[in-house]
Image (tube, rainbow, N blue to C red):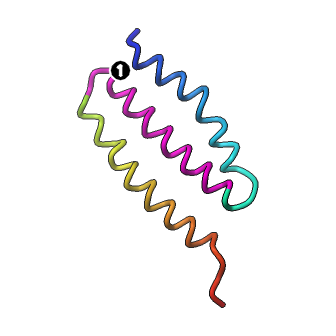
Amino acid sequence: MPVWLLVTGALLAGALPPGLALSARGPAEHRLVGLQLVSSVVVIVLVTASLGVGRPDYLIVPLVLVLLGFAGTLVFTRLAGESDD
């Protein structure tokens, strides 16, 4: 088994649950940090999985996810922020 797949499994088991727990409850600032952590972990997992299976053409998915994660963060902060009313 390639080392990259072991790294992928370790990231899924170790870094994803805390991010999901942070994004599920608490104040808006903590949920935003959890959202960013989950987004970062998923991108790294997809990159390591792509390297593990030897398919560099699969790297387009994490690239798109990085852009969507950034846009999602901007939308979340806009919706969670104070209203101007």
Q: In which image quadrant can residue 21 be found?
A: top right
Q: Residue at x 34, y 49 (%)?
A: 64
Is residue 26 part of the magenta span, yes or no?
no
* Count of all numbered marks drawn on residues in the image: 1
In the depicted structure, whether residue 8 falls above or below residue 41 = above
Pick the quarter of the image with the C terminus.
bottom right
In the rendered structure, the answer to whether residue 25 lies left or right of residue 82 reads right
Q: Is residue 84 above or below residue 9?
A: below
- Give the residues drawn in magenta, as a range: 30-55
Task: Residue lying at the far top in this picture: please name it.
Answer: 1
The x, y position of residue 16, in whole percent, is 59, 35
Residue 43: within the magenta?
yes
> Which residue occupies 74% across, 60% down?
27
The majority secondary structure of the magenta stretch comes to: helix
Residue placed furthest toward the bottom: 85
At a point 45% along the width and 54% down the height, the residue shown is 69
Measuring 41% from the left and 14% from the top, which residue is drawn there? 3
Quarter of the figure with the N terminus: top left
Left or right of residue 66: residue 28: right
Which residue ends up furthest to the right in the rendered image?
26
Q: Residues within 10 Å of mark 1 (few under 14, many from 20)?
A: some
**Which secondary structure lies at badge 1?**
helix
Give the image quarter of residue 45.
top left
Residue 48, image x, y percentages: 39, 27
Q: Quick check: 30 above or below 51?
A: below
Residue highlighted by disc 1: 52
| Amino acid of disc 1 | Gly
Task: Name the spot of residue 14 as percent of width and height, x first.
Answer: 61, 27
